[in-house]
Image: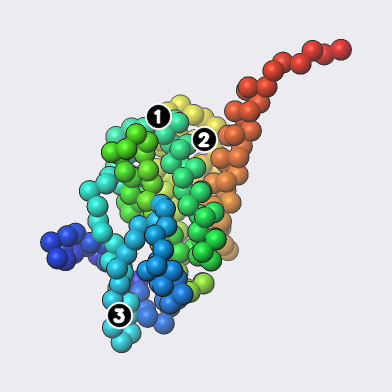
Amino acid sequence: MKISEMDLFGERFVVIECELKNVEIYQVKTFYYQRMTGIRPFRFSMSQDNCFFYFENSTDKTLAEVLQTGVTLNELHSMLNQMSLIFRESRDYLLYSDNFILDPRWIKVNTVSDSLRINLLYLPLKQGKAERFKSSLELLISILLKAFNELNDMEGFYYFIRLQDELQNSIEYFDIWYHLDTFLNGKEGIKSRKHDKPRNIQ
């Protein structure tokens, strides 16, 4: 798989080249007829052996840029919640979790609206044919734990420190979506407990 950038028809595109034998046509057709919230649309072309996916390289900032600029803790939680929701909804279309590219340099964030809106890259490949993006996950987790540290959220910081260690030591499949949901569900539990009314002890 190769990733590059180029100008086509006066627009800037991220171009991802994959072997044609690894592409799942069902998914390509799904994206052709259906626009999915939170997943960047693409155009595609095919040669005898390869398939090329063209993603418009919008002027939206990347997740790396947004976190470097600085966000609030609520904004950070909101972006993580959006990523989790995008993944859960993608299962309704029989998409594969491994096919999301989670490198923070390729995750786009729309900062124009009232709230930050996440858009992810997805490759419509057959199950098990996506390359393991361990380096991308390492970069994502590293940038997230740094953000939590700067926001003085030690719970988030230490959770992603632990996650970083587990990823580095993992040999088999690493389910980032499971860990993300676990973290977010834990945060919701803490919020609800904070709003519980005190009970009288008899």
Q: Earlier in the sequence, mark 3 or mark 2?
A: 3
- Classify mark 1: residues with Cα within 10 Å, few (<14), some (14-19) or many (20+): few
In the image, what residue occupies the spot 16% across and 66% down? 8
Instruction: Give the CA separation, mark 1 to mark 2.
Output: 13 Å
Tell which circle, 1 or 3, labels the residue nearer the N-terminal end.
Answer: 3
Q: Which residue is mark 2?
A: 156
Q: In x, y percent, where is residue 59? A: 22, 48
Residue 72: mark in rendering:
1
Q: Does residue 19 appear anywhere in the picture? A: yes
Under circle 2, the secondary element is helix
Taking 23 as reference, is 144 above or below it?
above
Q: Secondary structure at mark 3?
A: strand
* Vertical arrangement, residue 124 with respect to residue 77, above or below: below
User: Residue 105 location, x and y as percent?
Assistant: 32, 51
The quadrant in which the N terminus is found is: bottom left
Q: Amino acid at mark 2?
A: Gly
Identity of the residue furthest to the left in this view: 10
